[in-house]
Amino acid sequence: MNPLFAGLMNEAAHLTRSGRLSEATEAIQRALRGAAEPRPASPASTASTVAPDAPPAEADVIDVETRVVETAPETKAPSPRESNAADRWTRGSFAHQGRTVDYMLFVPADMPGQPAAARPLVVMLHGCTQGAADFAAGTRMNALAREAGAIVLYPEQAQRANGQKCWNWFKSQHQQRGRGEPALLAALTQHVTQQEHADRHRVYVAGLSAGGAMADVLGHCYPDVYAAVGVHSGLPHGAAHDMMSALNAMRTGAPAVRRDEAATARPTIVFHGDADTTVHANNGMAVLAGSPPGPATEGRSPSGRRFTRTLYPAFAGRGDSEHWRLHAAGHAWSGGSAEGSYTQPDGVDASREMLRFFLAHRLDDAAKE
């Protein structure tokens, strides 16, 4: 079932249970209209939240009481391309402000001459209907991170929090510092940074679709935690405030962001297919709205897929950014592996380019720009 259709039907069921029958009818009609239009399944689906929202924090801090529940490593060993005997590929669970999130963590073997404390950390946020292991396989980020000596963290959305396992980027309570999923994910990031002795000046976040939208939320809400952001087929922070506005943004593009809001963002690299029928390509441009574009170059992947790369120089407190327009590409991770879902293996290698972009930025550098 198309996750978008499933999400609308879940919303209708929620409205019916709440006694809001006319709104439920409208949701069902929208779902049926959407089902009549052929469109690929989407990791950007906006299913309604099932779990009650956590209360807002009293202050914009994340150094509150937390607990970590360690679980056994995956029983199925990663493929040789993803791991070697000295790598660590484990599962864990983390709780913060009454919310809990599971995660998978990749820690590469020690590299000669590189102290563990020097390692960067990349946080990867999956799209709807995906999970941590699926996203790791599809993006191939573990293999690339091993080459760079980077740690990779894959938080995993719970189905109890969203019926289609989407990050709730489209709800206002999950778009603010100190509240909801941004607070949970930032606290998890800081916990892993401390636990693994990673370099806190080189912590990055990236995501696909709903995960890309949440990555941009984190970049805006926690610019003191993340040095740079990667958004693949996602939407900008504040693109929507509920399910209806989310669907509108996905179909036609997000409203223009104010220049003062853009100036608070971290250096950002964006990938978006111009044939994406799930999240309109205008959203990729909107992520960098307010930033003056610089030079653009045309190129092709080794398999011949065309792209246009536009550089955005740093300005007014925002670091330099990049936008990659993927010509004739749909809603999928460019250059990914067919071992994971929502990938386009013949495209330019988005994982490699993101990692290259990330490692060129440090948090202290971003603060000075």
Image: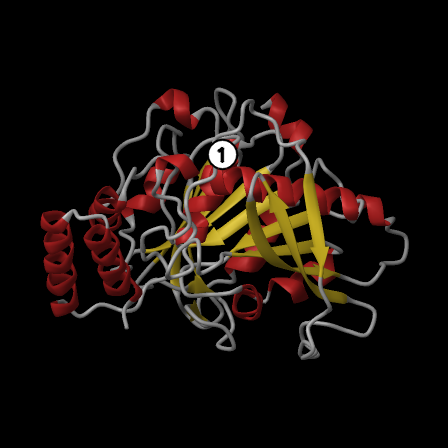
- Given residues 176 and 52, the one toward you in this image is 52
How busy is the neighbourhood of tag 1: few (under 14 within 10 Å), some, or many (20 plus)? many
Q: Is residue 222 left or right of residue 346?
A: right
Q: Is residue 82 left or right of residue 321?
A: right
Q: Is residue 145 above or below residue 56?
A: below
Q: Is residue 252 left or right of residue 353?
A: left
- Given residues 212 and 353, the one toward you in this image is 212
Q: Is residue 19 above or below residue 343?
A: above
Classify residue 277 by image quadrant. Answer: bottom left
Where is residue 186 shown, x and y percent of the image?
59, 40
Q: Answer yes or no: is residue 336 visible.
A: yes
Where is residue 286 shown, x and y percent of the image?
33, 38
Where is residue 228 shown, x and y percent of the image?
57, 39
Q: Residue at x 78, y 49 (%)?
A: 196
Which colour assignment does the render follow?
secondary structure
Q: Quadrant of the C terminus?
A: top right
As shown in the figure, which amino acid type bears the numbered disc 1?
Answer: Arg
Where is residue 311 shown, x and y percent of the image?
46, 40
Q: Is residue 243 left or right of residue 311?
A: left
The secondary element bearing badge 1 is classed as loop
Q: Residue at x 66, y 28 (%)?
A: 365
Q: Quadrant of the N terminus?
A: bottom left
**Which residue is labeled 1 in the image?**
179
Which residue, as the protein is rendered here, is positioned at the far right?
Answer: 113
Q: Is residue 290 above or below residue 204?
A: above
Q: Answer yes or no: is residue 268 visible.
A: no
